[in-house]
Amino acid sequence: MSTPGFGCYSEPGFTEIVSANKSVNKWLPGEGTAVLLPKAFIVPSNYLKKGMTINLAEYRGFYADGNKLITFPVGIGRMDWATPLGISKVDLKLENPSWYPPASVREEYKQEGMYLAPVIPAGPDNPLGKLAMRLDIPGGYFIHGTNKPDGVGMQVSHGCIRLFPEDIKIIFSKTNIGLQVKIIDEPFKIGILGDNIFLEIHETLVPRETINSYKSIQSMIESFIFERQLEVTIDWIKVKEAFEKKTGIPTLIADISIKTT
């Protein structure tokens, strides 16, 4: 799970802010309450150097064109409508798209006592927003804007990936048909910036004993150090604290310039 460094800053999404401020009431923070906004992010391991990588665990996307890296928050599929993992590509770009909700979604609305039309035209009621890019994944999954930006950074969609209107405008303009998109679930990340090693830990989307243990974090760090043949002393107290708190904030766990004695 090694990473090459950090991504550039983008406005954080809802879950990122909540994770970084766990002592603050997420619905009623109180007037004058200080809130920490995450402004640095470790790039996921094996991210696409030319393409788009969506890391579901941190509700964040990374767009790279070989020279520049852009990172942005995303909304993802609900637990019962999970966004599929894997590598795909963009096969269609739409401006002011109409939404054709699948029968399964219309049935869900019906069971909840609501009517959903077979076609939702472009406009303020369209959940796709003003821009949308389809992935060549069976089921009709899109990366798109939204008419409800509050849902960006949350598990709210039927599997599609939502971006803030200002972010989808940038990503849409840079994306060509055929661009590869990699969707991953990587809750633990480690990276080097200068002489410092940082660890970033997010809550896992689903319980998985194989990666949810502190031992798995230790193994990841030890492998990272071994692969790079680094002589360094890890601050395991900070590692333990980062694992327990899971704030999603990069934590300094070692200084490479300080050699092991």
Image (cartoon, helix red, strand yellow):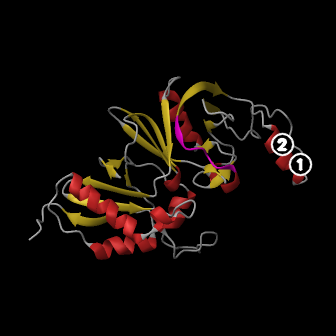
109 left or right of 178?
right
The answer to whether residue 100 is magenta is no
Quarter placement of the C terminus: bottom left
Question: In what element is the residue under mark 2?
Answer: helix
Q: CA distance from mark 2 to mark 1?
A: 6 Å
Query: 209 or 171: nearer the eye?
Result: 209
| Residue 258 falls in image quadrant | bottom left
**Residue at 40% in and 42% down:** 47
From the viewer's perspective, tell me whether residue 235 is left or right of residue 20.
left
What secondary structure is marked by label 1?
A: helix
Residue 50 pos. (x, y %): 39, 32
Which of 12 and 236 lies nearest the eye of the viewer? 236
Across and down, in percent, residue 212 comes to 47, 66
Residue 40: give its label.
none
Q: Relative to residue 198, is residue 214 depicted above or below? A: below
Which residue is labeled 2 in the image?
Answer: 106
The residue at 18%/57% (across/down) is 195
Residue under label 1? 110
Magenta-drawn stretch contains 82: yes
From the viewer's perspective, tell me whether residue 92 is left or right of residue 147.
left
Q: Tag 1: residue type?
A: Lys
Which span is picked out in magenta? 81-87
Residue positioned 16% across, 54% down in the render:
229
Q: Amino acid at mark 2?
A: Arg
